[in-house]
Image (cartoon, grey):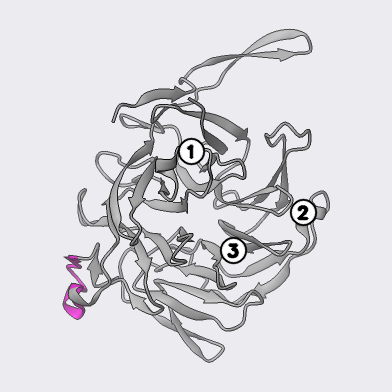
Amino acid sequence: MNRLTLGLLAGLVVLLVQGGSIAAELQGLPTLMLPPGFKAEVWVDGVDNARAMAYGDKGTLFVGSRKAGKVYALSDTNGDGRPDRVRVIAEGLNMPSGIAFRDGDLYVAEVQRIFKLVGIESRLDAPPSPTRVRDDLPTETHHGWRFIDFGPDGKLYVAIGAPCNVCPLARFERDGRTLRYGSITRMDADGRNWEVVADGVRNSVGFTWHPQTQKLWFTDNGRDMLGDDTPSCELNVLDRSGEDFGFPYCHAGSVADPEFGAQGRCSSAKAPAALLGPHVAPLGLAFYTGTQFPAEYRGNLFIAEHGSWNRSEKIGYRIQRVRIDASGQVIDQQPFAEGWLAGSQVSGRPADVLVAPDGALLVADDLGGRIWRIRYAP
């Protein structure tokens, strides 16, 4: 497929009108490559370590972070369609990567607890004190940052990553239920009835639901230290509650772990819906439900690949497009937005994607501390 170089060139000099004078500012932004007709722009800057995104009912864009320990609220106060105010509505938190919005409240996941900010969109300038949902999540920080979201069943889904690169997965008891690390769980909005829905999941930092089938689709980061090219990271789909996706015994559907593989068989693990590549670190994902993009993009799945951290040649650092047929089978995949990796130089790391109300695709870049906007404008 022919691709056009779009976006802002690295080292671009932007002319700014300031108080009647013209000032030059060196931006140092990457060159992004997109399919013909698409354009990319930095939509909001100054969102340190931007991770998961969620829209409020009144149009506020909420953004979590990991290293920054903050939760942001982005507001369009002048009505031009672009957020012009970035507020910090919570700070000093323990890796508040995951956020979700429901019934006027913003849910925030730290490592050890989930809380909500009640009626937050009417209280952005004076945020309320946190209201407890649960404060007894596992406290390990290795894969301890949580991704959360509400499913079509009204339940709050919470990822519980493995506290290791690869290890036997310990179980823990909560409210008379047995849960374990390396899983995707769900609970009522008030924190009750906590249960496991997907097992053998090493570290999922992104999940969503198919708009027609309502099935849960999620990314999973493959284990490290087996070389540059194995195992692949995964895209998975949950067909029924309780399915096991193999970790720590089996990786990518067919790679037996050299240490734990003898204790479990790949034949009994749920196979991935697609292999995304070794060490690409897939995080947030979203089905395209807008109408701005051409028809062939509707229903496609977009995945933010955060990029490798220990591969001898870097890989990922892009938005991947996955086409899925009417029966829910993956047809193919291909890069949609690239340019945050140029050779071995990294200028950005996509962490989440979100379809905006106008049909544009938003990309959270936690390295650049900004939100990109990709739109179709031939």
In the image, the segment drawn in magenta is 254-266
Which of 366 and 375 lies nearest the eye of the viewer?
Answer: 375
- Which mark is on residue 71? none
Which of 270 and 250 lies nearest the eye of the viewer?
Answer: 270
- Which mark is on residue 293? 1
Residue 107 % position (x, y): 65, 63
220 left or right, relative to 88: left
Confirm whether the magenta stretch covers residue 222: no
Q: Amino acid at mark 3?
A: Glu
Quadrant of residue 311 within the rendered picture: top left
Q: Amino acid at mark 1?
A: Phe
43 left or right, relative to 76: left
Which of 186 and 241 lies nearest the eye of the viewer?
Answer: 241
Residue at 38 percent of width and 77 percent of height: 240
Q: Between label 3 and label 1, give the one nearer the viewer.
A: 1
Residue 26 % position (x, y): 55, 17
Residue at 50 percent of width and 30 percent of height: 40
Residue 215 visible at all: yes
Which of 246 and 345 lies nearest the eye of the viewer?
Answer: 246
Would you name the residue on which mark 3 appears? 110
Instruction: Tell me how far mark 2 sits from mark 1, CA to CA.
Output: 29 Å
193 left or right, relative to 117: left
Would you name the residue on which mark 2 appears? 121
Instruction: Give the answer, above or below, for where 130 lies relative to 57.
Output: below
Q: Amino acid at mark 2?
A: Glu
Instruction: Single out the residue that lies furthest toward the bottom.
Output: 176
Q: Label 1 neighbourhood size at 10 Å, few (<14), some (14-19), many (20+)?
A: some
Find out whether the residues at labels 2 and 1 contact each other: C-beta distance under 8 Å: no
Q: Label 2 neighbourhood size at 10 Å, few (<14), some (14-19), many (20+)?
A: many
Residue 66 % position (x, y): 55, 53
Instruction: Give the answer, above or below, for where 36 lies relative to 259.
Output: above
